[in-house]
Amino acid sequence: MKRYNISYFFKEGISGVWSHGFMSFASVSVIITCLVLTGSIAFLVLSLNQTIASMGDLGDIRAYVDETFSDEEVAALETKVRNISNVSGVDFIDRDRGLQELKEEFGEEAYLLDGLEYDNPIRHSFRIVVMDIDKYDETLAAVESLRGIATVHSSKNAMDALVNIKNVLQGVSVGFVVLLGMVSVFLISNTIKLATFDRREEIGIMKMIGATDAFIRAPFIIESIIISQIAAGIAFILQWIICYYISGSKFAQLPIIEIAEFSKYMFLYLIAYMVTALVIGVTGSVASIRKFLRV
Amino acid sequence: MIRLTDVYHSYSTGTRALRGVDLTIEDGEFVFLVGPSGSGKSTIVKLLTGELRPTSGKVLVNEFHTSKMKQSEVPYLRRTLGVVFQDFRLIERKTVYENVAFAMRIIGASPKVIKKRVSYVLDLVGILHKARRKPNELSGGEQQRVAIARALVNNPSVIIADEPTGNLDPDRSLEIMMLLEKIHSLGTTVLVVTHERELVDQFDKRVVAIDGGLIVSDKTGGYYRYEEI
Ligand SMILES: Nc1ncnc2c1ncn2[C@@H]1O[C@H](COP(=O)(O)OP(=O)(O)O)[C@@H](O)[C@H]1O
Ligand SMILES: [Mg+2]
């Protein structure tokens, strides 16, 4: 493409957006809806991930070691635990520290545990930090199956519930992307079809004087890119506002809930919106102009 | 150069528009292609511009074998031709200047070259003073001049005009023919399709007559002969 043509393509593309105002508006609106709905669910998923991560202890696995194991055996066992895939950290808690922590948990009533130092009933244990919550079950099973692990404490049920919510949300958001994505492609392709229909005589003239298909197509693709990027821009600003309100809501003030920081993901959102909208726009326009170029 | 060798063309409707046409036009010639309505004249033009492919036979236009060329080559064939139609085919929303400049923009000419060349051809066809007008502000004869300027602007080796005077009164028609003759005298091959006897008779040119999809006469001397046959 010659440099001289770029400004022509843009001029034509912009005038196309204006002259099919209603269709452009409809396309922009649907793309915005698609992006913002999906983006908001994604934001909830992000927040949920953060909530799960911040639950710290709740997500950890506590594995108690068989008391007949020698120190060497315990050390070897620790290595085995560390080597389990999806384990991101292992904290060895010996009997004394275990008792100490228990006392701290008892607080005021710690005196109930007085005297236990002389015949400590607590076993050595590992606090195991799980990397990917989605593989929690496998990791838990792997820990349990190790020889020398006597009992395992985990918050499997609570974890499962959170992971389930997250999976449902993720599924819903994929559904939205597919469904609204298809509606968006359909609308934008109709907008461009209208544009090419308006210009069918001109397209015929252009072909007659030796324009390549790429040259003829370019303004229409630019038109759809402009539509899609306007939508991406507005969707991004809307998303920003929505996330700002979610962060300030009562829901966000619940003690266990951790809301993700939008500013941390802002750039990612912008890029994702621009790329998704671009794919929608270009797919829609290419699908609709092919027909008109056959002579 | 244009060479049709034993060309047949049938439309999908079954109409046999061309039934064995042999025709050679050398570089620098001026040729009238005449014949009654429905005789196959426009079909020949469409074969030359790559809009149609022959059902059988060979079509050679400026080194392009349109009978076997790829679809992607068609635009490059058309850039070696300038085509003019009865209905002008100008872009209504563009000015006269823009209509002509656009043909150069399509082939990627630089703005500087475009400016110079467009002014030159608009002057050549005598319409430079209306460069800023839109086509619908011009008379038919003026619009056809613009179309000729557009056909000319990329310096094609062949100009093909399919009934260029079909919508014009006799005086305007003569002016357009004289303009095409002037362009020919500047070195371009010109093929004019027409069925206007009086017009052809005013020029001393090669006249190829076609009837029923066959060449029935090919003589130089400016006589409209197909009716005699
Ligand atoms: N697109 C088409 N489909 C079917 N038949 C056509 C088509 N175009 C032309 N014809 C037929 O082919 C014959 C030649 O047409 P054409 O080349 O346009 O004649 P001319 O230009 O000499 O008037 C005519 O019988 C016409 O009806
Ligand atoms: Mg005709």
Image: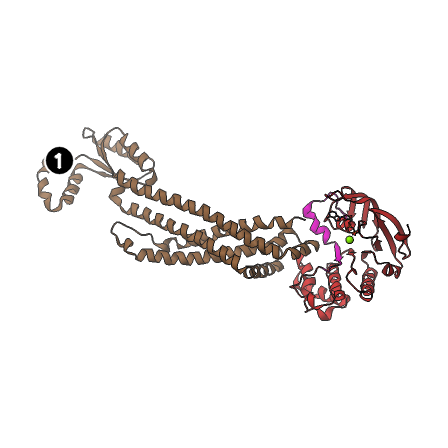
Query: Who's the residue at 45% across and 46% down the image?
Result: A179
Q: Secondary structure at mark 1?
A: loop
- Front-most of B143 and A8? B143
- Front-most of B15 and A293? B15
Range drawn in magenta: B63-88
What percent of the width, then of the height, locates residue B194? Answer: 82, 56
How is this picture coloured? by chain
Residue A106: in sight, yes or no? yes
- Front-most of B54 and B197? B197
Of all chains, the one bearing label 1 is A
What percent of the width, then of the height, locates residue A12? Answer: 59, 60
Residue A191 on the magenta segment = no
Residue B29: in sight, yes or no? no
Query: Who's the residue at 71% across and 51% down the image?
Result: B76
Which residue is the site of mark 1?
Answer: A120
Side of B36 where A243 appears, left or right: left
Q: Colour of chain B?
A: red
Chain corresponding to brown in the figure: A
- Front-most of A146 and A235? A235
Kindly identify the amino acid type of the residue bearing the numbered disc 1. Asn
Please rate how many residues cluster around mark 1, counting C-alpha atoms within 10 Å: few if below 14, some from 14 to 19, many from 20: few
In the image, is residue A126 above or below residue B195? above
What percent of the width, then of the height, locates residue B128? Answer: 73, 69
